[in-house]
Amino acid sequence: MKVVVVIPARYDSSRFRGKVLAKDTGKYLVQHTYERALCAKTPEKVLIATDSADVMAACKGFGADCVMTSAEHVSGTDRIAEAVKDVDADVVLNLQADEPEIDPPDIDYLAALLSDNPTADMATLVAEFDNAEQVADPNIVKAIVDKAGRAIYFSRSPIPYDRAAGGVGCQSQYLRHMGIYAFRKAFLMTFTSLEQGRLERIEKLEQLRAIEHGYTIITGKVGYAWEGIDTPDQYEAFVKRQR
């Protein structure tokens, strides 16, 4: 099984413009993520896909394999689909550029989920929550899975709703969705051609498109929920952790 990791790196992030090129640690943010991906054992290739000449130049500067993609893409998934169109791969992992603290073995585990579950079309990871406040945070996505680990639903709301507790109940009954995906390459091309469904438009969660169209997402639980970098404050905290 040939596995390729693609890191979509858009410059114009709405909440933190240019964050992928933030360099207060001495390395670009996207460089941290790229180097973590290189530490995984399964991928045969790690590729950065961007729409910015500045990002392309920076990535070439630290030796990364980087390709230019269209600026018209509305999602990172569309960007990675263009990037791997002519790449020989069985499985394509979508790793966001703003996740510099991902544990490399989790990348290997994610790829193995598709190897171990031949009927699944894509895979993703979940983890336990650190505190109840995170469960209530709409910026942190929650997941519901069946007993076999297949995703039933994802939501920004606390799911399941604990009726006895009036909303958020015991923290241990919730799963946090980690925003990394593995696609079978053939399904990736199918996925990007599917129409958005009603639930995806309401929740603004792209993975719901697969569920709405009847495809299977297998999940795997990891022991550590790494934090993505969405805001300048989160980046500042990351910089402090690197010292």
Image (spheres, rainbow, N blue to C red):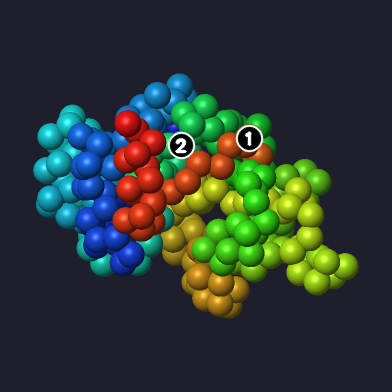
Residue that carries the numbered disc 2 in the rendered image: 102
Q: Residue at x 22, y 56 (%)?
A: 18
Q: Residue at x 43, y 48 (%)?
A: 228
Q: Is residue 228 left or right of residue 174?
A: left
Circle 1 packing at 10 Å, graded few (<14), some (14-19), many (20+), is few
Q: Work out whether residue 87 or residue 68 is closer to the camera in this orientation and state it.
A: 68
Q: Residue at x 39, y 51 (%)?
A: 234
Q: Work out whether residue 133 or residue 32 is closer to the camera in this orientation and state it.
A: 133
Please provide percent x and percent y for residue 196. Answer: 50, 72
Q: For numbered disc 2, what is the local secondary structure?
A: loop
Q: Work out whether residue 171 or residue 123 is closer to the camera in this orientation and state it.
A: 171
Residue type at mark 2 is Ile
Q: Is residue 72 left or right of residue 145?
A: left
Please determine whether, in this image, residue 214 is positioned above or below residue 171. below
Q: Residue at x 48, y 57 (%)?
A: 190
Please provide percent x and percent y for residue 141. Answer: 58, 59
Give the alpha-carbon distance from disc 1 to disc 2, as whole Å.
12 Å
Please provide percent x and percent y for residue 169. Answer: 79, 60
For residue 199, the mark is: none
User: Which residue is most to the right?
Assistant: 164
For residue 223, the mark is: 1
Q: Is residue 4 left or right of residue 50?
A: right
